[in-house]
Amino acid sequence: MSIRLRLTLLYSAILALTLIVFGSVLYTTQAQSTLNELKQDLRASGDNLMRAIVRTYLDPNPQLPRYSPPSPIPFEVISGEQAFRDLREREIVRVLNANGALIASPFGSDQEALPLNTTGLQMLQRGQVWWEIVSLEDERLLVYNIPLMVDNQVVLIAQVARPLTERDRSLAALSTTLIIGSLLTTLAAFGIGWMLSGTALNPIHRITHTAQAIGSESDFTRRVDYTGPNDEVGRLATTFNAMLSRLQEAYQRVSDALKMQRDFVADVSHELRTPLTTVRGNLALLRRDPPIPNEEQADILNDLVEESDRLIRLVNNLLVLARADAGQSLKREPVPARTVIEQACRQARQRERQREIIEAGQEVIVQGDRDALKQVLLTLLDNALKYTEGTITVTTRTSGQHGIIEVMDNGPGISPDTLPHVFERFYRGDIDTSVSGHGLGLSIARSLIEGQGGTISIESRIAGGSTVQIRLPLAQEGQEKNR
């Protein structure tokens, strides 16, 4: 069952219940009101009747028999007062003796007394009035029974009745009107509610269709078109669009990550294939029969050692990148930049003693990881030694809340097209392929620096050298004292 149908049925049921309660209250109120009016009229008529009977009964020459005559006497015998003449036009009247036997009726006609049950007779004999609704000749009557007390004894009982036919017809007409009106109102409300709920839920249908289209087309750029008020449905549409925006961003990140992963696997496969192919070819040469000369075997073994070392370096670099991608935390402690720079420069000079590496600048205490910073500096110095022939300068300074380390060379520089890609994995650009390397050094350096909460950038111009800048947060004064 749809929400639209459930909502329509719900408020149709509520309306129907309200109409039933309202109709029941109205019907009950009308029935009780008309009954009370009838009782009031009968009570007034009955009181007038009893006063006339009392005057006649107490007359010194009473015409009213004090016993049950053979046949009922007419009312004119009892009294000619206006009360009796009026009663003949409006009410049904009977006069009974104390035992409930009929003693007077209109024109003295031989009619039965109005029905009176045993309980009512007992109540009348005790001097209490008795109301009763009875049926006589398929007609309902409201009967007002009044006892006449003389010396604390019931001597007569007067019955004043009025037909309920008109009242019953009015109540039946009211009941029919209420039932038919309630049914028609409920049906009309159901139709109107169906249309209104459809209009109110139309934005939800659009959200559903948009979600289905997104699921089938994987198009996270689509949005729900909603121009209504900022009600519950409007907030739902806004929230759904915001969720789509976040899904689009996440989907784009996942797509980019998958693309990077595919590129990474392809690049790793390419880098591993060359040394493995070389190793496999050299091993095939060593297995030749007859064997190759000893001098060639020695050269092949040297090639195998070099290729094995190359594979080891590549695997180590990949492990460093894998740890960085996995979010492996680095230390955050005060590190004297000049001390780390001196150690890195000393190791670099041992590789090429004829090259000049200059250290300059002030002592700077940065917040970071000593080993990671040293590895980054060794990578930068190694690149400078590979691709330049002149002097290499390493300087330190402060800028605001950051310490700056710069590695500068006077090499051929990097072209503007290549510069934006130098930190990408396995990217070597237009660099001389005769220089050994895998294109992972700067990518590793960026991962390590960012892992310490810093940034790394490079500036270069053709024939003007390159400058790599490392920016790390300065250590706090309290941390420096605790070192």
Image (spheres, rainbow, N blue to C red):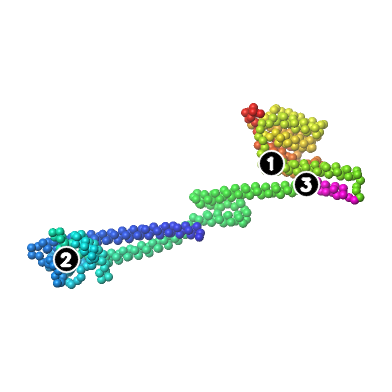
The residue drawn where x is 71% and y is 35% is 371
* Camera sees residue 469: no
Which badge, 3 or 1, is on the more N-terminal residue?
3
| Residue 163, x across and y down, in percent | 25, 66
Please tell me in which quadrant of the rendered image residue 436 appears. top right
Badge 1 marks a residue whose secondary structure is helix
With 326 as the anchor, is 73 left or right in this view? left
Which badge, 3 or 2, is on the more N-terminal residue?
2
Q: Amino acid at mark 2?
A: Asn
Badge 3 marks a residue whose secondary structure is helix
Residue tagged 1:
324
The span shown in magenta is 274-289
Residue tagged 3:
272
Position of the C terminus by quadrant: top right
Using the image, determine if residue 335 lies above or below residue 121: above
**Main secondary-structure element of the magenta-colored stretch:** helix
Q: Amino acid at mark 3?
A: Leu
3D distance between C-alphas at marks 1 and 2: 117 Å
Label 3 CA crowd tier, 10 Å (few <14, some 14–19, many 20+): some
* Camera sees residue 262: yes
| Residue 427, x across and y down, in percent | 74, 44
Q: Nearer the viewer, residue 220 or 6?
A: 6
Badge 2 marks a residue whose secondary structure is strand
Label 1 CA crowd tier, 10 Å (few <14, some 14–19, many 20+): some
Closer mark to the observer between disc 1 and disc 2: 2
Q: How many marks?
A: 3
Residue 277 in the magenta stretch? The answer is yes
Please tell me in which quadrant of the rendered image residue 374 appears. top right
Q: Amino acid at mark 1?
A: Ala
Task: Name the disc covering residue 97, or none.
Answer: 2
With 46 as the anchor, is 249 left or right in this view? right
Please tell me in which quadrant of the rendered image residue 209 appears. bottom right
